[in-house]
Amino acid sequence: DTAVSQTPKYLVTQMGNDKSIKCEQNLGHDTMYWYKQDSKKFLKIMFSYNNKELIINETVPNRFSPKSPDKAHLNLHINSLELGDSAVYFCASRYTSGGFNEQFFGPGTRLTVL
Amino acid sequence: AQSVTQLDSQVPVFEEAPVELRCNYSSSVSVYLFWYVQYPNQGLQLLLKYLSGSTLVKGINGFEAEFNKSQTSFHLRKPSVHISDTAEYFCAVGSIQGAQKLVFGQGTRLTINP
């Protein structure tokens, strides 16, 4: 029944490793987002895909690479993890047609880099 | 470009007291305005939104907000809070055109004391 789900919920890893976070939505939405929430709770958009096409690409290190295999999935791969990557990463989705549609957020993935 | 300023990082209030969480925004284009709530260890949930029309909008859990265009503000209010309202509250703006990326304020931690 979960509308926007993320895996894993928690991820603890060493500096220098490569890791992926996955997001899936079963709402039939066609646009998905990745947001980063830092230790001070500040939320900032990273990427957005619409129908598998990248439409928002904020100033994010190129160690971060989003991938959307289909419009229900948006994954985030991070290479060479750094201490500063520790944060909670939220996925969100929405439907773009018919005017305004709210974004629905997933529960978040807490990434800790040691 | 848009920016959002939440004027209070923390607001402690007693149960059943009224509360106001302040939000000011800046934008060179027309925007939608939102308040999201984040309960501990959870994702974001939409409380209410302003798209157009009446400047007073009502949301879930007894919250309401008033859009003031001249003061570029969108303050959140509740006449009587409950312990269960303890959470982090985020004000956000989203551009009407384009990909509707959300720009968030820094968050306000609302703590309800018995």
Image (cartoon, coloured by chain):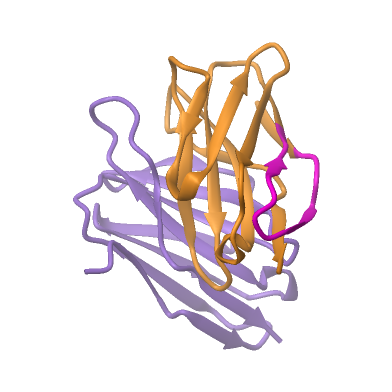
Chain colours: A purple, B orange
x, y (%) of residue A43?
Answer: 63, 53
The residue positioned 61% from the left and 54% from the top of the image is B81
- Quadrant where the N terminus of chain A sits is bottom left
Is residue B85 visible to us here?
yes
Left or right: residue B56 versus residue A25 is: right
Left or right of B108? Residue B81 is left
Q: How many marks?
A: 0
In the image, residue B96 sits, relative to residue A82, either above or below, namely above
Q: Residue at x 70, y 11 (%)?
A: B70
In percent of width and height, residue A34 lies at 48, 55
Nearer the observer, A27 or A48: A27
Residue under the point 37% across and 59% down? A67
Which of the pair B37/B60 is nearer the observer? B60
Asked whether residue A60 is in view, the answer is no
Residue appearing at x 59%, y 87% in the figure: A12
In the image, the segment drawn in magenta is B6-23
A88 and A107: which one is in front? A107
